[in-house]
């Protein structure tokens, strides 16, 4: 992840902020510098979201593997 502040964001917080960044970029009217800063922030937020989703996938895979192991043991 990119910073301690970003690490503290929940998935929902990062997603909501990312939605706002995209909305602002799509609306236009920002200077080039502002647009670049928004783009960079969006990339950071996307990484946070991806980190959360990968963690959720790992937990789901582990739970499913545990269930499969229990069924084989029966």
Image (cartoon, rainbow, N blue to C red):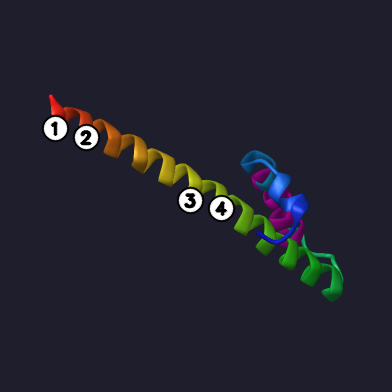
Q: Which mark is first along the chain, 4 or 2? A: 4
Q: Which mark is residue 16?
A: none
Q: Which residue is mark 4?
A: 51
For marks 2 and 4, give the CA distance. Answer: 26 Å
Predominant secondary structure in magenta?
helix
> Dots 1 and 3: beta carbons under 8 Å?
no
For marks 4 and 3, give the CA distance. Answer: 5 Å
Front-most of 32 and 65?
65
Q: Nearer the viewer, mark 1 or mark 3?
A: 1
Q: Which mark is residue 72?
A: 1
Circle 2 residues within 10 Å: few <14, some 14–19, many ≥20: few
Front-most of 12 and 19?
12
Q: What residue do we see at 68% from left, 49% from top?
A: 19
Circle 4 residues within 10 Å: few <14, some 14–19, many ≥20: some
Q: Nearer the viewer, mark 1 or mark 4?
A: 1
Determine the image quadrant of residue 1: bottom right
Image location (x, y in percent) of residue 69: 21, 34
Q: Answer with left or right where residue 64 lies relative to residue 51.
A: left
> Dots 1 and 2: beta carbons under 8 Å?
yes
For marks 1 and 3, give the CA distance. Answer: 27 Å
Q: Which residue is mark 3?
A: 54
> Dots 4 and 3: beta carbons under 8 Å?
yes
Q: What residue do we see at 73% from left, 67% from top?
A: 40
Judged from the image, the secondary structure of the residue bearing numbered disc 2 is: helix
For marks 1 and 4, give the CA distance. Answer: 32 Å
Query: Which span is picked out in magenta?
Result: 15-26
């Amino acid at each position: 992840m990119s910073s301690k502040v970003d690490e503290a964001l929940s998935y929902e917080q990062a997603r909501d902020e990312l939605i706002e960044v995209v909305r602002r970029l799509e609306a236009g009217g920002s200077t080039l510098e502002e647009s670049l800063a928004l783009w960079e922030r969006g990339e950071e937020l996307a990484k946070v979201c991806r980190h959360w989703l990968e963690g959720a996938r790992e937990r789901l895979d582990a739970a499913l593997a545990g269930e499969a192991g229990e069924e084989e043991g029966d």
